[in-house]
Amino acid sequence: MIKRFLFNKLIAEIGQREINIILGPRQVGKTTLLKGLKGYAEGEGFSTVFFDLEQPQVLAEFNISDSEIIEKIEGSSQIVFIDEFQYIKNVSRILKAVYDSDIRIKIFCSGSSSLEIHKHLKESLAGRKFLFRLYPLQFSEIRENTPEYPLDLYLRYGGMPGLTHADSEDRKQQILAELLSSYILKDIKSLIKEENIRSFNHLLYLLAERQGSTISIHSLASQIGLSAKAVNRYLDILEETYVNYRIYSYSQNLGNELKKSCKTYLYDLGIRNALLKDFSGITDRPDRGILLESYVFLKLQTMLAPNMEIKFWRTKDGDEVDFILLVNRRPIPIEVKSGLSRLEIPKGIKRFLLRYRDIKRAFVINERITDSLEYNGCTIDFINFDMFERKGIKNFLCQDPVS
């Protein structure tokens, strides 16, 4: 089993009262993570119980009244693990009652998808829960277990844990196809009318094809034969099931900036390539730059703290910066350059720094160059993909510029 970076954070939560809820897409390892926590807790002397609600016989045990479920949880063990907790009706109200009772029980839950559950979590469990996001395996998580694993393979097949033991590329491709099919059948079929499944699949393909580019809702709607309202709803569903992320343009209302546009990124590179049916090596792929940009975005996504947000910047004249990382609302431009061959500040970074003159740090992530330059009062760090994977961006913000 590959140990997840989130594991140690969750271990530290065992002694805390709050209900811990692990959210993420299907098959990213939430069940395995909960079982690992269960084993650790038992090793520390705690009594535990594990409810896997994906198992019909276990879910049937919860087909009782709310008060009976509360009694069932309170009378079970010191630490309770509930996998896919969204299947319990009125689950947030039940967890609130357990939390507010005099019986001290620690609860860990996991959930994959429910458009309703987010509303209930905010309303019923405010101040009583901490949310954690589990993503597909990061490249560095795989490398800790398999040091020789190449970035090329990660960019082609992504980080879904089920692929780690696949013994051939054909097997990896088959698993990814099954994951896509399972998502459509389990999560989407109940949310979308049967006659619209084909349009939804077409939308998924278009999002994969246009990943990293600004998208037009009206253009997407026209191509798949649905209304703009329906497309927006489908994008909401993709986001609420953790399968696709939208990021929006950064602007301080300067006249030439795009203000309402967005870019999208699917949650895993292997899933994207499965949608496109293209697992070829990245050396000669026309979308090589998009693969590397997407890889950087997905890594940034795992680093986000409550005071951080990812946007992008683009002007009507075509100037752009791939990502604007907001830290305490202060922008840090980040450009991904796959083919950078010499120490040169990208045009988009220059234009951004000329418009926003109080920026103190910027980053250019590339394959080879590690150095730094000063421009318009800003330190621009050039870091390669290996440094970015090992240290992220947050660590660099606390250090002196690259020398």
Image (tube, grey):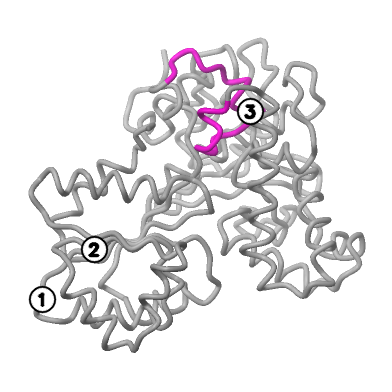
Magenta part of the protein: which range?
146-166
Q: Where 112 falls versus 150 (above or below)?
A: below
Element type where label 1 sits in the image: loop
Task: Give the camera-side residue of 400 and 179.
Answer: 179
Residue 247 visible in the snapshot: no
| Callout 2 secondary element | strand
Q: Residue at x 21, y 78 (%)?
A: 98
Residue 123, horizontal then vertical, whole percent: 38, 81
Residue displayed at 70% across by 29% down: 347
292 over 226 or under it: above or below: above
Query: Badge 2, how many Cα within 10 Å: few under 14, some, many 20+?
Result: many
Using residue 75 as the reference point, say whether residue 288 is left or right of it: right
Q: Position of residue 354 (x, y in %)?
A: 62, 38
Distance from disc 3 to disc 1, alpha carbons, whole Å, reads 48 Å
User: Mark 1 or mark 3, which is nearer the start of the sequence?
Assistant: 1
Figure check: 315 above or below 280: below
Residue ID at (70%, 71%): 233
Direction from residue 328 to residue 154 in the image, left or right: right
In the image, residue 127 lies at what x, y percent? 26, 73
Instruction: State yes or no: residue 210 in magenta.
Output: no
x, y (%) of residue 166? 57, 28
Residue for badge 3: 155
The residue type indicated by label 2 comes to Val
Q: Residue furthest front?
A: 57
Amino acid on which the number 3 mark rests in the picture: Leu
- Left or right relative to 38: residue 60: right
Mark 1, other Cα within 10 Å: few <14 / some 14–19 / many ≥20: few
> Dividing the image into 4 quarters, which one contains the N terminus?
top left
What residue is disc 1 on?
103
Residue position for label 2:
80
Q: Say which quadrant the C terminus sits in.
A: top left
Mark 2 vs mark 3, CA separation in Å: 37 Å
